[in-house]
């Protein structure tokens, strides 16, 4: 009886940490994006990958140490999996961002970024929870 409640509590705690860490990383991404577009005069579609790299560092450290801290795997394995997950999310983000810029123009980059980030966040959580920081997958691969 106690196990389902504990599992729900863990998922809820992970959801809160995922949201907080993700919001922090997203804020860094957006801050870098705006700085690069406004002050470095980069096109939004070129600034977005650079901003992603800045946010990735915060995202990985936060998720590894806070969101999925009870996961039992090496930081290197988690880094590799999170990088793959993040790149999938970023690939989708960049494709949608480029399409949005093409349709609405460079001046729409900031609101496009917000909408696309919300959409991609759901995919990122699923990949993180069930693959990048998955305890069962780690346990199975370490036994082989």
Image: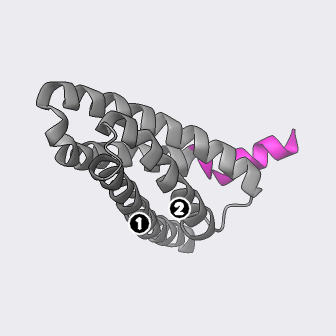
Residue 13, above or below 30: below
126 sits to left or right of 65? left
Q: Residues within 10 Å of mark 2 (few under 14, many from 20)?
A: some
Residue 103, above or below 75: above
Q: Earlier in the sequence, mark 1 or mark 2?
A: 1
Q: Taken as a whole, is the magenta stretch helix, strand or loop?
A: helix
Residues at discs 1 and 2 in contact (Cβ within 8 Å): yes
Total labels drawn: 2
In this view, the residue in front, 28 or 114, is: 28
Q: At which x and y percent is residue 67?
A: 54, 66
Residue 70, above or below 39: below
Q: What's the colour scheme? A: one colour
Element type at mark 1: helix
Residue 141, above or below 66: above
Residue 138 colored in magenta in the image = yes
Looking at the rendering, the stretch of residues picked out in magenta corresponds to 131-144
Q: Residues within 10 Å of mark 1 (few under 14, many from 20)?
A: some
The residue at the point 55 percent across, 66 percent down is 62
Q: At which x and y percent is residue 22?
A: 42, 60
Disc 1/disc 2 C-alpha distance (Å): 8 Å
Element type at mark 2: helix
The residue at the point 39 percent across, 64 percent down is 19
Residue receiving disc 1: 24
Residue receiving disc 2: 58
Residue 88 colored in magenta in the image = no
In this view, the residue in front, 74 or 12, is: 74
């Amino acid at each position: 009886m106690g196990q389902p409640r504990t599992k729900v509590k863990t998922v809820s705690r992970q959801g809160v940490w995922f949201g907080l860490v993700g919001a922090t990383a997203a804020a860094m991404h957006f801050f870098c994006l705006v700085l690069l577009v406004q002050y470095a005069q980069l096109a939004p579609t070129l600034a977005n990958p650079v901003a992603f790299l800045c946010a990735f560092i915060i995202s990985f450290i936060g998720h590894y140490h806070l969101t999925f801290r009870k996961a039992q795997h090496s930081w290197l394995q988690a880094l590799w999996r999170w990088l793959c997950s993040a790149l999938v999310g970023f690939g989708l983000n960049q494709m949608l961002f480029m399409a949005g810029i093409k349709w609405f123009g460079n001046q729409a980059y900031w609101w496009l970024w917000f909408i696309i980030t919300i959409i991609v966040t759901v995919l990122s959580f699923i990949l993180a929870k069930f693959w990048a920081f998955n305890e069962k997958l780690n346990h199975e691969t370490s036994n082989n």
